[in-house]
Amino acid sequence: MNEVRDYIVLPLRNLERKRHGFKFDIGAEFFSGFRNTELIKGSAEIFLEVEKFSHFMNVTLNFSGILTVSCDRCLEELDIPVEGENLLSVRFGKAPDTPEEESPDEDVMYVNAEDEEIDLTDYIYESICLALPIQRVHGDDENGKSRCNPEMLKYISGSRNVEKASPFDILKDMNK
């Protein structure tokens, strides 16, 4: 469970019905609170544009930063730039009882109209993590040579050349 509570909180009660802008800088302490073993560390700038109406508000999230993860090939640390933009619709009131009433194309969060504030910490964390590529490996340098740890690459290429004994090898000599 998330230990970083109330890290990115927006006021609801005293927020006027108009467009607002918020900026947050997050670092290693933010990411370490989630206990994600894939993420080693990270930092990002968060920009929130909030447009409040009477029964809902739209939150546009823009972020850019660098996350440090392990390389899938050599297991060394790898810095990956991430950026993205998401739209979250925050609706005041009770969530619908049936999922058919929600649009599958938009992120929707329901909050009680009497709440003082809304915590967007988990939403922002998940949005940033989803911006990571599926495959995370060091790229090649200008000569086309991998930037991965050369010792690990030797180990990996050496293990591929080892021929595995087939369980049927013993049958080769039976007809002699």
Image (cartoon, grey):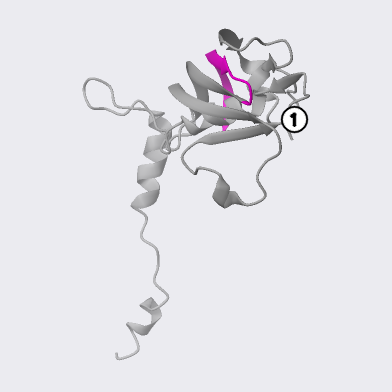
Q: Which quadrant of the rendered structure holds the C terminus?
A: bottom left
- Judging depth in this view, the residue of 83 and 94 nearest the camera is 94
Q: Amino acid at mark 1?
A: Asn
According to the picture, the residue beneath numbered tag 1 turns out to be 112
Which residue is located at x 23 percent, y 27 percent?
144
Q: Which residues are magenta?
A: 38-55
Q: In the rendered picture of this protein, how many numbered marks are placed on residues?
A: 1
Quarter residue 74 falls in: top left
Q: With respect to residue 159, does 23 lie above or below? A: above
Which residue is located at x 63 percent, y 17 percent?
28
> In the image, is 6 to the left or to the right of 69?
right
- Judging depth in this view, the residue of 87 and 94 nearest the camera is 94
Quarter residue 162 falls in: bottom left
Q: With respect to residue 136, does 124 lie above or below? A: above
Q: Which quadrant of the rendered structure holds the N terminus?
A: top right
Query: Looking at the image, which residue sits at the far left?
Result: 143
Which residue is located at x 48 percent, y 18 percent?
62
- What crowding class fits label 1: few (fewer than 14 Cα within 10 Å), some (14-19), or many (20 or more)? few
> In the image, is 56 to the left or to the right of 115?
left
Residue 78 visible in rendering: no
Main SS, magenta region, reads strand
- Judging depth in this view, the residue of 39 and 63 nearest the camera is 63
Quarter residue 109 falls in: top right
Find numbered disc 1 in the image and state the secondary structure of the residue it sits on.
Answer: loop
Query: Looking at the image, which residue sits at the far front?
Result: 54
Residue 43 painted magenta: yes
In the image, residue 60 lies at what x, y percent? 50, 20
Residue 102 visible in rendering: yes
Which residue is located at x 49 percent, y 17 percent?
63
